[in-house]
Amino acid sequence: GLTALAFGFSTVTFLVGAPETRLTSLDNGLRVASEETGHGTCTVGLWISAGSRYESEKNNGAGFFLEHMAFKGTKKHPQTALEQQVESMGAHLSAYTSREHTAYYMKTMAKDLPKAVELLSEVVQNCSLSEAEIEQQRGVVLRELEEVESNLQDVCLDLLHATAFQGTPLGHSVMGPSDNARTLTRQDLVEYVNSHYKAPRMVLAAAGGVNHDELVSLAKTHFSGVSFEYEGDAVPVLSPCRFTGSEIRMRDDALPLAHVAIAVEGASAASPDIVPLMVANSIIGSFDLTFGGGKVGHLSSRLARLAAEENLCHSFQAFHSSYSDTGLLGIYFVADKNCIDDMMHWSQNAWMNLCTTVTESDVARGKNALKASLVGQLNGTTPICDDIGRHILNYGRRIPLAEWDARIDAVTPRMVRDICSKYIYDKCPAVAGVGPIEQLPDYNRMRSAMYWLRF
């Protein structure tokens, strides 16, 4: 795992009163992590290093399909019994799959932690995967795939990955193609679990009214049997996913608005560059017409002010998706077909400003907005639990808020300019456009707006 030294300093004081995240490893390599907040409720779950990036063309979508099977009964509890158990506790059972992570988690009363851990261990280790249930879920997955096609933000960002990471597993979508949803077999699902659900790639995380020592003993009871060995030493090694500057266009003039994303290759989750890039994104900010109080006074970012004054777009957001060895640093916007050209111009202009002329006051504002959003994201036991699970998979430890704060404080305008120049300046972007995008500039014009001929 990463040590604090990877980030350039060794010890950090915790935010006053912030509970510590405790971390224990079992003999088989499964990690147990918790933050005790004294709530009457808790969230507990398993975070696993598995996701669509671990899939091939043939089984892409297996992780997502499995997530659907998870709550359809286990060897011990058929579906109705499982649902009754969860309901009688007044609990909520949820799951998600992303490109590199899978999570199964439960929000429940603190006193029901033992039952929750037992049920989660059942779901992950003994999912029944009955043929009848697989056939039934096939229909559900296919319907969800259709629904996603109407969520143009998801479509646009999936296309962005498909072009930016073309020819690599990061180019796959999480849900996989509908052909796979039709053809995946029980054997494919079993093989996926057997290949990836290994103890060293799992974290049992909990937050809220939890006692760490109790959680560790529950983990020993229910998860000591999880294998840490791979059959025939077939340890799946993630192949590096190469970024390709390129574009993908799905023109459909019948759609009311254009959805456009432009991105460069970003930093990996554990890169020290991540904090200056987060500050940079925070300077670009976001904007949404539908948020009330669209008075320009509230809009601290230049691009947001422009967007509001000139009606450049309906919404935009700067984003950074980071993976274990790469990332996408970009701007996504939704605009009227006649404003695409202008919005692209001002978005790229905002990038050039970051690389060349960003000021002390821009950076101070970006830092404050970033700190506020990091605190705001952690309201409730479920977001905290998710934060713990993902951090331990990404960094080998939970990075406390005080440490983020210290790293954000250390960012200077010079660092923002240097690090943005390293990632953005004169780089080939990846671009995805969906909808009435006739006005999206041609690729060479967008490429040439990635540098300025004036210094």
Image (spheres, rainbow, N blue to C red):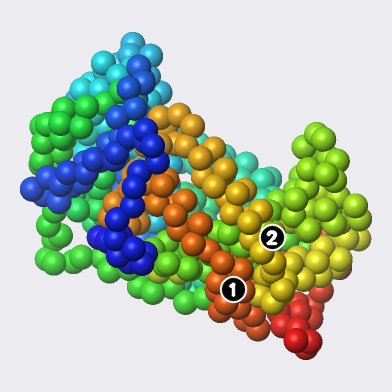
Assign a secondary structure to mark 1: helix
Name the residue furthest left: 27
Number of other residues with Cα within 10 Å of mark 1, as a class: few under 14, some 14 to 19, many 20 or more: some
User: Measuring 78% from the left and 63% from the top, which residue is drawn there?
Assistant: 251
Q: In the rendered image, which quarter is residue 211 located in?
A: top left
Image spot of residue 307 (x, y percent): 84, 54
Image spot of residue 42 (x, y percent): 34, 25
Q: Which residue is mark 2?
A: 362
The one of 108 and 391 positioned closer to us in this rendering: 391
State whether residue 286 appears in this view: yes
Q: In the picture provided, is 336 more to the left or to the right than 170? A: right
Image: 379 above or below 413:
above
Image spot of residue 167 (x, y percent): 49, 74
**Type of residue at label 2?**
Asp
Quarter holding the C terminus is bottom right
Name the residue furthest top: 88
Image: 231 above or below 356:
above
Q: In the rendered image, which quarter is residue 359 located in?
A: bottom right
Q: In the picture provided, is 186 more to the left or to the right than 265? A: left
User: Measuring 76% from the left and 79% from the top, which residue is drawn there?
Assistant: 449
User: Measuring 49% from the left and 62% from the top, which residue is drawn there?
Assistant: 410
Q: Which residue is mark 1?
A: 414
The one of 411 and 450 positioned closer to us in this rendering: 411
Image: 345 above or below 97:
below
Q: Are marks 1 and 2 in contact (CB under 8 Å)?
A: no
Disc with the residue nearer the chain's start (1 vs 2):
2
Q: CA distance from mark 1 to mark 2?
A: 12 Å
Number of other residues with Cα within 10 Å of mark 2, as a class: few under 14, some 14 to 19, many 20 or more: many
User: Measuring 78% from the left and 43% from the top, which residue is drawn there?
Assistant: 298
State whether residue 222 appears in this view: no
Quarter holding the N terminus is bottom left
Q: In the rendered image, which quarter is residue 223 located in?
A: top left
